[in-house]
């Protein structure tokens, strides 16, 4: 009669039909009952493949799943017990250093992290510590450090500034400059600037900020004033796209002013969450006093991540992708995503009153807004809610300060989003637009329906 042995739990046999969600039960239950209760709740979640809001990988191939299942129980920090895992992590660091044109990839320093946010924190800490050391050496104050980035920066950098007592200085995006421009950077920096952080794949729009132009502007500033301001590139999304799709772009360690780069392995690195990487141009770019040596795990190993115990599986999956795909495979995967992004952007303009902001020519992200005066009966928030009825999670959100009156929508094209799925999505989008256009009165904007996360 029942699909699982639910009534094995004594509290249910005694007539208590509710198990507390906020207290550990006095008596346990059968494993099949426990897992079924959890799976029942998970059915209320959205389907990861239909989540067009997230940059994070939601599917890998069966062989990768097998590798994950066989290695998730290894603790990455226990380098003495798992020396080959440590060796593979180091190989990944060297591979990324070479991919990003480090002057000496075999001796570059870097580390895996629990995600790009942790990698950003480490990159920012190194910037602050290097600035402090240089100022102390000159006998100058180390108070009131500041850091410069775009108003469209990912929220982790706002957290960094808050957590580590650094003044954030924003270069506002504008309708004419949807990314941080060099002139704005020069207006924001001074002798207390620990670094400038261009975003290489802006979360809001998918655009690359002009790292090379910003570096050139800072080079000219140094020649005039002596101020030597380093760059950290937040390449959370673009670091695994540009080397394959836009190899002619100069944004990485080819620019001597770029001292560190972070990337999300679990975004376009194509690995399950959570894995990030941060690489420094040269060993001396990571201050020695940020490195700690641990002896109580059976050896004496350096550690400079913020987290400690972590599963090894994601690091091994990253190496699996490097072996499995190679440069040619990464190109094919990213090119396929970009092709679908271009397909979506071309079709969107024919479906509704949309103005395309970005068509996926940088990272495979498509963004659009409603044309001025096109409708007063519905908004992109209403459209987002209608798409949710079909199962599609598509965020609608305002642009950051100085452009917060502009609301846009965004689709992140990931590896698992096929051309067939894109066509199905477009069909549902047509239905949603048709329904909204049929209304003869304004549709309320219910904020609890907003899908405004942008990770």
Image: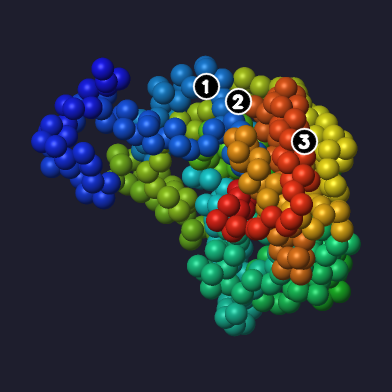
- Looking at this view, is 419 or 111 the one in front? 419
Residues at discs 1 and 2 in contact (Cβ within 8 Å): yes
- Asked whether residue 65 is in view, the answer is yes
Q: Which residue is mark 3?
A: 430
Residue 16's disc is none
Mark-to-mark CA distance, 2 and 3: 37 Å
Q: Which residue is mark 2?
A: 321
Residue 401, compared with residue 407, is above or below; it is: below
Residue beneath the point at 82% across and 69% down: 184
Mark found first going from the N terminus, 2 or 3:
2
Side (left or right) of 332 relative to 95: right
How packed is label 1: few (under 14 Cα within 10 Å), some, or many (20 or more)? many
Mark found first going from the N terminus, 1 or 2:
1
How packed is label 2: few (under 14 Cα within 10 Å), some, or many (20 or more)? some
Q: Which residue ends up furthest to the front in the rendered image? A: 440
Q: List x then y, in percent, for residue 174.
A: 83, 65
Residue beneath the point at 76% across and 69% down: 402
Point out the frontmost of discs 2 and 3: 3
Q: Which residue is mark 1?
A: 64
């Amino acid at each position: 009669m029942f699909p699982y042995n639910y009534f094995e739990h004594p509290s249910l046999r005694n007539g208590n039909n509710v198990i507390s969600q906020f207290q550990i039960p006095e008596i346990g239950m059968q494993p099949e009952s426990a897992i079924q209760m959890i799976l029942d709740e998970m059915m209320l979640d959205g389907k990861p493949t239909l989540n067009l809001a997230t940059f994070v990988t939601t599917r890998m191939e069966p062989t990768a799943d097998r590798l994950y299942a066989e290695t998730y129980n290894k603790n990455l920090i226990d380098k003495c017990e798992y020396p080959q895992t440590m060796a593979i992590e180091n190989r990944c660091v060297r591979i990324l250093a070479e991919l990003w044109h480090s002057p000496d990839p075999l001796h570059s320093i870097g580390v895996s992290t629990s995600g790009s946010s942790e990698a950003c924190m480490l990159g920012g800490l190194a910037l602050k510590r290097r600035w402090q050391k240089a100022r102390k050496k000159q006998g100058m104050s180390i108070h009131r450090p500041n850091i410069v980035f775009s108003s469209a920066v990912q929220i982790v950098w706002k957290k960094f500034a808050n957590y580590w007592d650094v003044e954030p200085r924003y270069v506002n995006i504008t309708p004419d400059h949807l990314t941080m421009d060099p002139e704005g950077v020069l207006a924001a920096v001074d002798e207390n600037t620990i670094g400038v952080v261009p975003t290489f794949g802006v979360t809001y729009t998918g655009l690359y900020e002009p790292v090379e132009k910003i570096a050139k502007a800072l080079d000219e500033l140094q020649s005039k004033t002596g101020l030597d301001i380093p760059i950290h590139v937040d390449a959370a999304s673009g670091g695994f796209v540009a080397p394959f799709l836009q190899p002619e772009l100069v944004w990485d360690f080819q620019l001597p002013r770029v001292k560190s780069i972070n990337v999300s392995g679990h975004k376009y690195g194509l690995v399950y969450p959570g894995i990030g990487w941060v690489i420094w141009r040269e060993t001396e770019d990571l201050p020695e006093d940020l490195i700690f040596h641990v002896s109580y795990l059976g050896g004496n190993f350096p550690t400079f991540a913020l987290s400690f115990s972590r599963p090894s599986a994601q690091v091994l999956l990253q190496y699996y992708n490097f072996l499995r795909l190679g440069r040619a495979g990464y190109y094919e995967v990213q090119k396929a995503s970009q092709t679908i992004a271009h397909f979506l952007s071309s079709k969107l303009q024919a479906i509704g009153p949309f103005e395309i902001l970005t068509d996926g020519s940088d990272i495979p992200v498509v963004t659009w807004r409603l044309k001025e005066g096109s409708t007063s009966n519905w908004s992109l928030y209403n459209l987002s809610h209608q798409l949710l009825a079909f199962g599609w999670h598509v965020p609608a959100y305002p642009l950051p300060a100085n452009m917060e009156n502009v609301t846009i929508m965004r689709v992140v094209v990931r590896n698992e989003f096929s051309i067939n799925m894109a066509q199905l999505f477009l069909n549902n989008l047509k239905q949603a637009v048709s329904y909204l256009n049929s209304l003869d009165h304004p549709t309320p904007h219910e904020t609890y329906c907003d899908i405004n996360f942008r990770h």
